[in-house]
C-alpha cells in the first residue's frame, strides 16, 4: 500500500515555528515530530511505501527521514519546483503509484484508520474519498437576515456546524489521468470538477481525534494535550523514537 504525504508547504500560518523547520518536523510533546507520528501510524496500518512531496526546507525532511527503514517503510521523495497546490504534486507521481492510494497533508494529527479509509475507497469505486470531520465555528458577530431593507431575523453570535475536509484522501489513478501534470491543481478544483462531471466524491465520516496543525493556536493545543492523546495516536504503532 502506498501513501503520498504532502510536505512541501511553507507553513506561513505557523510562523515563527516554521521559520527554520518545515511544518511536518515541528515537535509535538518531548519525543516526536508530526511526521514521526504519521509514519509510525502508516507502518502500523500495513503501508509499505511512502512518497514525501517536499519543497520548502525539503532537504531537512530528507535528512531527518532518510530511506524510512526506521519505520519499516520504503520512502521516496518528489521535489516540487514550484507551488502546485494539493493535487499538483500527485499528478507528477502517477506513473509511480498503484491504482488506489492514500494522499494526506503532512501536518495532520489524527487517530483515524488509514487502512480502513483506503479499504472503503477501494470497495466504493468512488473517484475520490474524503475523510470528513464535524467542526463548529463560532461567529463573533450578531447575524442579521434582511429582506428589502428590513431586518427579519437576528441571532447573536451563532455557532455554525460544518463537515470539513480532514486533509486525508483515498484516491484512484484513473481519477487524475484527465488532468495535466506540471500545473497547479488544488483539492478544491478536483472536487468541483468531479461534481460538474456528475462523478461525486464519497465521504469517510470520522468522529475520533483530529487536529490540523495550521496555526500557532492549534500547535499550542496539540502540545498542551499531547500526554492525553499520545496513547490514542500511537496505539500499537512501531514508533521510531521509542
Image: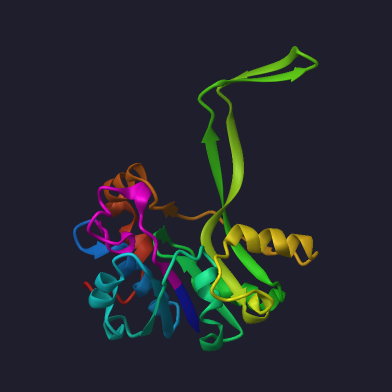
Position of 158 compared to 42: left or right? right
Question: Percent position (x, y) of residue 140?
Answer: 50, 25
Farthest residue, direction top? 150
- The quarter in which the C terminus is drawn is bottom left
Residue found at x 38% / y 84%: 76
Question: How many marks overall?
Answer: 0
Q: Which is more toward the observer, 110 or 76?
A: 76
Residue found at x 54% / y 44%: 135
Position of 155 compared to 168: left or right? right
Is residue 203 visible to us here?
A: no
Question: Percent position (x, y) of residue 147?
Answer: 79, 18
* Residue 229 position (above or below residue 90): above
Question: Percent position (x, y) of residue 192?
Answer: 70, 58
Position of 156 compared to 57: left or right? right
Figure quadrant of residue 236: bottom left
Residue found at x 31% / y 70%: 58
Figure quadrant of residue 47: bottom left
Q: Which is more toward the observer, 218 or 214?
A: 214
Q: Which residues are magenta?
A: 5-28
Residue found at x 56% / y 67%: 169
Question: Percent position (x, y) of residue 87?
Answer: 55, 68
Q: Which is more toward the observer, 154 or 190?
A: 190
Position of 58 compared to 208: left or right? left
Farthest residue, direction left? 30
**Residue 12 sits inside the magenta stretch:** yes
**Residue 164 sits inside the magenta stretch:** no
Q: How is the image coloured?
A: rainbow
Is residue 175 visible to us here?
A: yes
Amino acid at each position: 500500500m502506498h501513501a503520498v504525504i504532502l510536505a512541501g508547504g511553507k507553513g506561513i500560518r505557523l510562523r515563527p515555528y516554521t521559520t527554520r523547520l518545515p511544518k511536518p518536523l515541528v515537535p509535538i510533546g518531548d519525543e516526536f515530530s508530526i511526521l514521526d507520528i504519521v509514519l509510525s501510524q502508516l507502518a502500523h496500518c500495513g503501508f509499505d511505501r511512502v512518497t514525501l512531496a517536499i519543497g520548502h526546507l525539503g532537504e531537512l525532511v530528507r535528512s531527518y527521514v532518510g530511506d524510512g527503514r526506521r519505520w519499516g517503510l520504503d520512502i521516496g521523495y518528489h521535489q516540487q519546483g514550484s507551488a502546485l497546490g494539493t493535487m499538483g504534486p500527485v499528478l507528477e507521481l502517477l506513473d509511480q503509484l498503484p491504482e488506489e492510494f492514500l494522499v494526506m497533508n503532512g501536518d495532520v494529527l489524527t487517530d483515524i484508520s488509514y487502512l480502513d479509509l483506503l479499504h472503503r475507497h477501494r470497495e466504493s469505486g468512488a473517484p475520490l474519498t474524503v475523510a470528513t470531520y464535524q467542526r463548529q465555528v463560532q461567529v463573533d458577530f450578531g447575524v442579521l437576515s434582511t429582506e428589502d431593507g428590513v431586518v427579519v431575523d437576528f441571532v447573536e453570535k451563532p455557532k455554525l456546524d460544518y463537515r470539513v475536509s480532514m486533509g486525508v484522501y483515498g484516491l484512484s489513478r484513473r481519477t487524475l489521468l484527465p488532468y495535466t501534470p506540471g500545473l497547479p491543481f488544488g483539492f478544491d478544483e478536483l472536487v468541483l470538477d468531479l461534481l460538474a462531471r456528475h462523478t461525486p466524491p464519497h465521504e469517510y465520516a470520522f468522529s475520533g481525534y483530529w487536529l490540523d496543525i495550521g496555526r500557532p493556536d492549534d500547535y499550542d493545543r496539540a502540545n498542551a494535550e499531547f500526554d492525553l492523546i499520545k496513547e490514542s495516536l500511537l496505539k500499537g504503532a512501531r514508533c521510531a523514537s521509542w
